Amino acid sequence: MFTPHRDLLYYAENGLFEAAFRVAGALIETGIIEAESKERRFNIPQERARYTGLLPICEDDLTIIFRRGCAQIQRFRAETHRFQVVHQPEGGIEVRMEDLVVTRVQCDRFERAHGLGTPNRSVSPANAGGFVQTNDHADVTMDGVD
């Protein structure tokens, strides 16, 4: 799937596109967000542990990354009424545009949600510079070479 930069920015700003960052050994605190009222919310920590793996970037941070090329991330996207914040390194983690990862699951979800894919859809050489593939990657050809 090829999408122009401005379209990705729109999708990110509106929560339609999820990208992640590969964290390596950061101290991440997770927990529950409780609301006393609409104006008052409290974070109730449940766990603080070293984490290595992919964590999804929040929409507002993705917007900054797409506009400026990088951002200091101090929190990651979490399920509803939950939080994930960075405790170490202090000041957060710098994430650059080239650090972003879109998982196969997210790519498939996005394509289904926007009607961009079918099981046998392929990219043709006319619009892909000689690259041809089926969605399941069973057949991939580059400039006529399998």
Image (cartoon, rainbow, N blue to C red):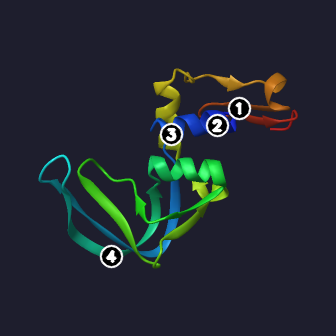
Q: Position of residue 133 (x, y in %)?
A: 71, 32
**CB contact under 8 Å: marks 1 and 2:** yes
The image quadrant that residue 43 belongs to is: bottom left
Residue, disc 1: 133
Q: Amino acid at mark 3?
A: Glu
Please identify the quadrant where the C terminus is shown. top right
- Dot 2 corresponds to which residue? 137
Tell me where residue 88 sits by quadrant.
Answer: bottom left
Left or right: 85 as drawn, with respect to 129:
left
Q: Earlier in the sequence, mark 3 or mark 1?
A: 3
The residue at which mark 3 appears reads as 13
**Vertical side of 73 occupied by 126: above or below:** above
Amino acid carrying label 1: it is Gln
Which residue matches tag 4? 49
Q: Amino acid at mark 4?
A: Ala
Which label sits in the foreground, 3 or 1? Answer: 3
Mark 4 or mark 1: name the one nearer the start of the chain: 4
Q: Taking the image as drawn, is residue 102 in sight?
A: no
Residue in front for this viewpoint, 124 or 77 = 77
